Image (cartoon, coloured by chain):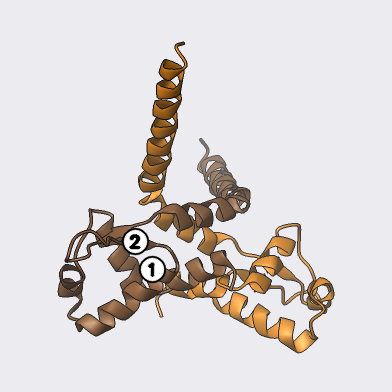
Chain colours: A orange, B brown
Amino acid sequence: MDPLSITLSALADPTRRAILARLAGGERSVKDLAQPFAMSLPAVSKHLKVLEKAKLIERSREAQWRPCKLAPEPLKDVSSWLEQYRQHWEQRLDRLDQYLKDIQHKKDNSDGK
Amino acid sequence: MDPLSITLSALADPTRRAILARLAGGERSVKDLAQPFAMSLPAVSKHLKVLEKAKLIERSREAQWRPCKLAPEPLKDVSSWLEQYRQHWEQRLDRLDQYLKDIQHKKDNSDGK
């Protein structure tokens, strides 16, 4: 699989996204990460392996408790890929904005303003 | 599955991303989309169904050839979700930048500049 597909596939899970959100606050142990999810350690470890394979997290080899750390580079790559579509969603919002202005204008006219 | 997971999962495929990139240039028929991929029509239709389910494309019901159109709103949602991590990847780049400046500074000093 190509790197972008690996990243997107790893992100396509609410638990893995929640793990990343927690790591955004600083590094944590696996035990610490497992706590709010009412999930077994092996289940969390499985999710961490997917995130590690996608290079979205790094595990320290220094400390004995091997803390997990957010690795944001693949997220930057997703953001860069998305940029080519920005004009498309902004155009849609502009058109909606114009449409709302148009109906307000028609309403004002019919109200005799 | 939650909407964001459905979007990310639909995007986690290079053929589906290539289809979106082509639709960014304007609406196209299924036959037209299939052409550059050397793929059967049923194979392309399967990808289009995934994209349609994720609301990333819309298929017109007006014209008989039912053209496909890019629907960018879910991409905007991915972009919004990513924003919370922007400071993380930018900080990393800042630190790399500082590191490169530091070693250049040391080199200049040892060169007697």
Q: From the viewer's perspective, is A53 left or right of A84?
A: right
Picture mark count: 2
Q: Amino acid at mark 2?
A: Glu
Mark number, residue A111: none
Picture residue at 79% right of the left edge, 85% below the top: A41
Give SS at disc 1: helix
Q: Residues within 10 Å of mark 2 (few under 14, many from 20)?
A: some
- Where is mark 2, residue-wise? B58
Picture residue at 15% right of the left edge, 73% below the top: B35
Q: Amino acid at mark 1?
A: Glu
Whether A51 is drawn above or below A85: the answer is below
Disc on the earlier residue, 2 or 1 = 1
Mark number, residue B52: 1
Q: Residue furthest top?
A: A113
Picture residue at 67% right of the left edge, 85% below the top: A46
Give SS at disc 2: strand
Q: From the viewer's perspective, is A30 left or right of B66?
A: right
Whether A76 is drawn above or below A16: the answer is above
Please state the chain letter of the residue tagged with numbered disc 1 in the rendered image: B
Residue B17 figure quarter? bottom left
Closest to the observer, B96 or B22: B22
Query: Are the residues under badges 2 and 1 in a single subunit?
Result: yes
Q: What quarter of the picture does the N terminus of chain A occupy? A: bottom left
Closest to the observer, A30 or A93: A93
Whether A72 is drawn above or below B102: the answer is below
In space, the residues marked 2 and 1 are separated at their CA atoms by: 6 Å
> Residue A20 placed where, x, y %?
67, 65
Q: Residues within 10 Å of mark 1 (few under 14, many from 20)?
A: some
Q: Are marks 2 and 1 in contact (CB under 8 Å)?
A: yes
Residue A44 figure quarter? bottom right
